[in-house]
Image (cartoon, grey):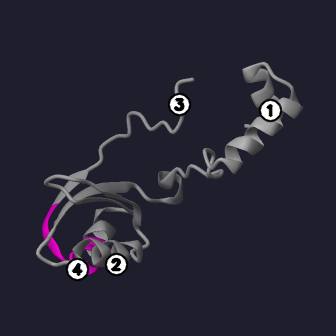
Amino acid sequence: MPVAELCDAVGSTAAVTSRRLARLRADRIILGKEAIIDWSKLGYNVEVSLRVGLDKTQSRAFDDFIAAAREVPEVIEIQTFLGRVDVRLSVIAKDMTQYQQIYRARILTLPHIADIEALMQVARIKSDEVLPV
């Protein structure tokens, strides 16, 4: 949002708002600006969440897996967890045929996979990056 619009929303002047934003950036609370992409408008109509369990008998399982997963262009998000699921990948594809090709050629060849479960996304109900302030 433009600074002028932010000033109106918080009831402050441009100078004060600009200083506060600069301080938030300096303190690394605001880490940057990002674009939110509507993948479907670019033809990516399939999104699958993969829950992956790794072979933790391998000392480099996490590092090797994550490094290799970063190289798969269709992997748009990687999260790590404590518990039964070690890693979650979000994978996009234009259609199910392309997803199947990505899954077989790029995902199943990632190192140290012990278990994998695919969850097909039907709808995104809520996706907020905003604090309720």
> How far apart, in angstroms, are the residues tagged by discs 1 and 4?
48 Å
Neighbor class of circle 4 (other Cα within 10 Å; few <14, some 14-19, many 20+) is some
User: Dot 1 corresponds to which residue?
Assistant: 17
Residue 47: which numbered mark, if any?
Answer: none
In reply to whether residue 92 is colored magenta, the answer given is no
Closer-to-camera residue (41/16):
16
Q: Which of pointers 3 and 4 lies earlier in the amino acid sequence?
A: 4
Looking at the rendered image, the quarter that the C terminus falls into is: top right
Q: Which of pointers 4 and 2 lies earlier in the amino acid sequence?
A: 2
Q: Residue furthest front?
A: 27
x and y, in percent, of residue 24 in the image: 68, 42
Q: Is residue 8 left or right of residue 104?
A: right
Q: Which of pointers 2 and 1 lies earlier in the amino acid sequence?
A: 1
Instruction: Kindly check if marks 4 and 2 are in contact, taking CB atoms under 8 A apart as contact.
Output: yes
Q: Amino acid at mark 3?
A: Leu
Q: Amino acid at mark 4?
A: Pro
In reply to whether residue 115 is colored magenta, the answer given is yes
User: Dot 2 corresponds to which residue?
Assistant: 68
Mark 1 or 4: in front is 1
User: Dot 3 corresponds to which residue?
Assistant: 131
Q: Residue at x 22, y 52 (%)?
A: 119
Q: Which residues are magenta?
A: 102-116
Closer-to-camera residue (62/4):
62
Q: Residue at x 22, y 79 (%)?
A: 111
User: Dot 4 corresponds to which residue?
Assistant: 111
Q: Is residue 115 left or right of residue 80?
A: left
Q: Which of pointers 1 and 4 lies earlier in the amino acid sequence?
A: 1
> How far apart, in angstroms, are the residues tagged by discs 3 and 4?
37 Å
Instruction: Kindly check if marks 3 and 1 are in contact, taking CB atoms under 8 A apart as contact.
Output: no
Closer-to-camera residue (56/102):
56
SS for dot 1:
helix
